[in-house]
Amino acid sequence: MAEELIRRTAAELAGALTRREVSSVEVTRAHLDRIAAVDGTRDADGVATGPGVHAFLHVSAESALAEAAFVDAARAAGETLPPLAGVPIAVKDVMTTRGVPTTCGSRILTGWVPPYDATVVRKLKESRLVLLGKTNMDEFAMGSSTEHSAYGPTRNPWDPTRIPGGSGGGSAAALAAFEAPLATGTDTGGSIRQPASVTGTVGVKPTYGAVSRYGLVALASSLDQAGPCARTVLDTALLHAVMAGHDPRDSTSLSDPVPDVVAAATTMDVSGMRIGVVRELHGDAENGSGYQAGVLRRFDEAVEALVDAGAKVVEVSCPSFTTALAAYYLILPSEASSNLAKFDAMRYGLRVRPEGVSDPTAEQVMAASRAAGFGDEVKRRIILGAYALSSGYYDAYYGSAQKVRTLVQRDFAAAFAEADVLVSPTSPTTAFPLGAKLDDPLSMYLQDVATIPANLAGVPGMSLPAGLADEDGLPVGVQILAPARADDRLYRVGAVLEAALRGRWGGPLLDRIPEFPPLGG
Amino acid sequence: MSAISREEVAHLASLSRIDLGPAELDTLAGQLDVILGAVAAVQQVAGDDVPATSHPMPLTNVTRSDTPRPSLGSAAVLAGAPEAEQGRFRVPRILEED
């Protein structure tokens, strides 16, 4: 029973809960048992020890079971509950949770317990979802592998020697390992979509401003966007509908009504839709563009599947996308260096006194605390941002990057005049081995080459499974991009593609995931 | 010629309030030089006629009405403080000794 429960989709669980075929306590306990069986252990400092997925930084077993019991009682009393009431969810550790530790994968926030909930978290609670715990991530969402977490990396459930993507590798791995049916993410340059791609799961970065940023610990405020992660397109839509909507607490929150993404995920019709293949995001394996051959093969098949379903394919060109990555790695560090200045060791977070100084100044304490509390990647980006913003370099670096951002927006506008959605591989490669890119930050950054343009322009994007690469048997993701505020198109196209590919595979891709190695002991 | 020197990295680290050791400075200077070499590509793309974009969406300033309302109590606010005293944050000295 428990094994069967953890493999169900959120939509299936919601149906069974509504019909009272199963209780939320049973569903929640099944997932907590799964976490206990495969996630592994952490030492007193919270650092991952031994084997295991290590998707979670914190598990709230007691409060999860208590909330599940409340939902069951409400249902038994005949209350009308929201659609996902009683379904468990994992929350990325970048979102503040009142009374539950929030670290952002950083040593500087070890032990910090926020006094308030992020708006997204509040909405999850109001929709009566059951919060299982907080998921691992690259420190302050800087990275594409979760290896930059101060608490140790998460492992890819498809192959524990490989990365689960990042920054939201914990959320994606929790889904792929059947530790949770739903999870939240944030996507600044691909942190929802790239982990989805390399774990065979689904993730959506909504239109900028569609989901409130209140209570998300900011990385780059003009790029950050929270979104849903799940194992199916429909589940992703159901969670999207819960998370999205205007929030007066976020001045960049869109006031537009949320598109009906759930209806779009069940339309099952793409006939006549124009699918734009972005030339600049479709590398040529022969000329060394960095796109893996097996990734391109699965992507081309996905495009064929859409054609078979009645869509029309057009090739579009977005020349600025080739410099979007460079622009991003100037804009992001610039904004991050400013956002992370708040970690000053004065009001919350780690405080370290410098060695050998008897009565240190606030400034000395600040510098010692930030040195001890931040990891290498965070330091690298803060200093890179400080450089790009410094006088004498501002125009050449930050200023030029902002102009590229204009060109990226113009390219999207031109492309969406010719196509209803754009498609590309989500990530140029499948999951790479843990440690492979740690000493070469630039090669790690290249993972984001196809996902970054959407963040620069604020348009929504989805990644969904396209199959397994022939050369390594690991998941490949296909990315769908839509114009700003047309998030529903992602779901309309994604649902048709998912159904077509499952028809070919004879079931969900995750049916083919190897059983995660037992933890032993 | 390198885009960034070890001395510049040390200066920026000091402005960013991050203590860096000699070994860290060496590594960072090398890595930042490679990264800056790659991202310098932005300088070749856009001409003077292209305006800068700082944000993906058109923004209008939002303000709320200036009326008192309940907020977090001081105990909740101070709960995460490294040090607190008499209902306030206790911080290291901010002035140099004279």
Image (cartoon, coloured by chain):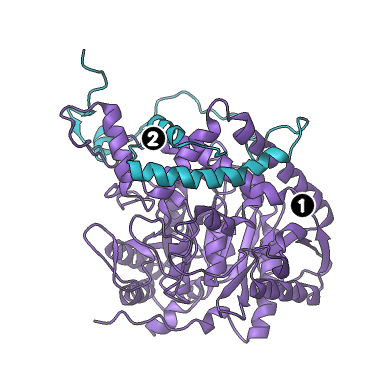
Callout 2: SS: helix
Callout 1: SS: loop
Q: Nearer the viewer, residue A410 or A58?
A: A410
Measuring 47% from the left and 65% from the top, which residue is drawn there? A436
Q: Which chain is purple?
A: A
Q: How dense is the environment of label 2, judged by Cα within 10 Å: few (below 14), some, or many (20 and up)?
A: few
Mark 2, residue position: A342
Numbered label tally = 2
**In x, y percent, where is residue A390?**
52, 29
**In x, y percent, where is residue B91?**
23, 28
Q: Which chain is cyan?
A: B
Q: Is residue A209 visible?
A: no
In this view, the residue farthest toward the left is: A358
Q: Nearer the viewer, residue A323 or A271?
A: A323
Q: Which one is in front in this view, the residue at disc 1 or the one at disc 2?
A: 1
Of callouts 1 and 2, the N-terminal one: 1
Q: Nearer the viewer, residue A330 or B25?
A: B25
Mark 1, residue position: A318
Quarter of the rendering occupied by the C terminus of chain A = bottom left
Measuring 42% from the left and 57% from the top, which residue is drawn there? A137
Quarter of the rendering occupied by the N terminus of chain A = bottom left
Q: Is residue A325 visible?
A: yes
Q: CA distance from mark 1 to mark 2?
A: 37 Å
